[in-house]
Image (tube, rainbow, N blue to C red):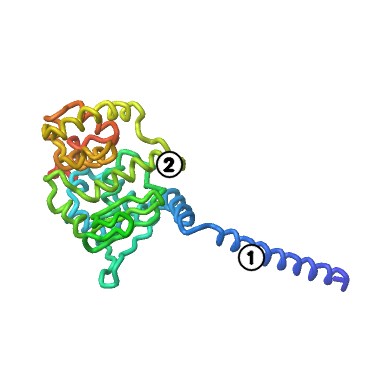
Amino acid sequence: MTSGLVIIIILFALILFAAGIIFWSTLNSVVDLFNHATRYRFKHLWYSVFSKQGLNIHQREILLKNFTYYQKLDAENKWLFERRVRTFMGMKEFIVRTDEFELTEEMKVMISACAVQLSFGFPGIFFRHFYRILIYPDDYYSTITKKYHQGEVNRGGIIVLSWKNFLLGYMEENDGRNLGLHEMAHALLLEDAIMNGEFEFLDGEALEMWEELVVHEMILIQNGNSIFRRYGASNRHELFAVAVEVYFEQPLQMKQYSPRLYATMSKLLNQDILALAPVSQAHL
């Protein structure tokens, strides 16, 4: 090999090396331009496309011990539920809000399962817009409203929950109150309205049916003649969140109260809570 050819090869290698450094530096700069929320949305895409695993034994035991909805699913749907929970957990950032309060595996599994419970009828929906979940030990004070809250959904992409009240929702399963489902219901409506990859997944006809029922139902609530608590009359969004709580915790009562209302909720959520496999068949 001549010395001239060696020099050419060395120069070519140096050019490639320099180009690689420039490319890597540019790529890092571009990545730095993305804000925290955008990076978590890319994380969502990664998990939704490539994550095919279920839960580990400890995580599964948390559901078997605490999550009746999961317990009632048949074997195939249990596996699908687990995969959805794992994907949701992987693409969200969970943050506890006090130094004395530690983030646990139970918190991540239970909150993720709550979201999947509500969205189980929509295989591709993982609340993409909401990348961060804040967890307080108890009621927390809002500097914006100047009031104490148990939970809220922020349009900026944040879901806030009081862990104590979240747990109460799953410990007392038949009272028609569940903080987690209430807040996830708000997130579901917002997710459907935000133009991203999860835009307009709710059935349009079911939404129209729901809107027809809302006006009449709010009057019934105000007169004390509704299955829903008075807070549901605050506005149509709160009524939907309250209706979700009752749908999952008191489905038979809702169906007896109004078959049309129950059918509308089932169509909206694309699932029928009363048709879940009974517990006795859950491990077949």
Occupied quadrant, residue 24: bottom right
Q: Provide residue 69's location: percent of width, then percent of height.
A: 20, 46
Residue 194 numbered mark, or none:
2
Q: Which residue occupies 60% across, 62% down?
A: 29
The N terminus lies in which quarter of the figure? bottom right
Q: Secondary structure at mark 2?
A: loop
Residue identified by numbered label 1: 25
Q: Secondary structure at mark 1?
A: helix
Q: Earlier in the sequence, mark 1 or mark 2?
A: 1
Occupied quadrant, residue 43: bottom left
Q: Amino acid at mark 2?
A: Ile
The C terminus lies in which quarter of the figure? top left
Residue 230 numbered mark, or none:
none
Q: Which residue occupies 25% across, 30% down?
A: 214
Q: Is residue 26 left or right of residue 227?
A: right
Q: Which residue occupies 25% across, 56% down?
A: 147
Nearer the observer, 158 or 128: 158
Q: Which residue occupies 14% across, 48% down?
A: 173
Q: Amino acid at mark 1?
A: Ser
Q: How many numbered marks have been drawn onto this rendered protein structure?
A: 2
Nearer the observer, 72 or 219: 219
Q: Provide residue 162's location: percent of width, then percent of height.
A: 24, 58
Q: Provide residue 142's location: percent of width, then percent of height.
A: 29, 58
Occupied quadrant, residue 53: bottom left
Q: Provide residue 117's location: percent of width, then percent of height.
A: 26, 45
Q: CA distance from mark 1 to mark 2?
A: 33 Å
Nearer the observer, 234 or 264: 234
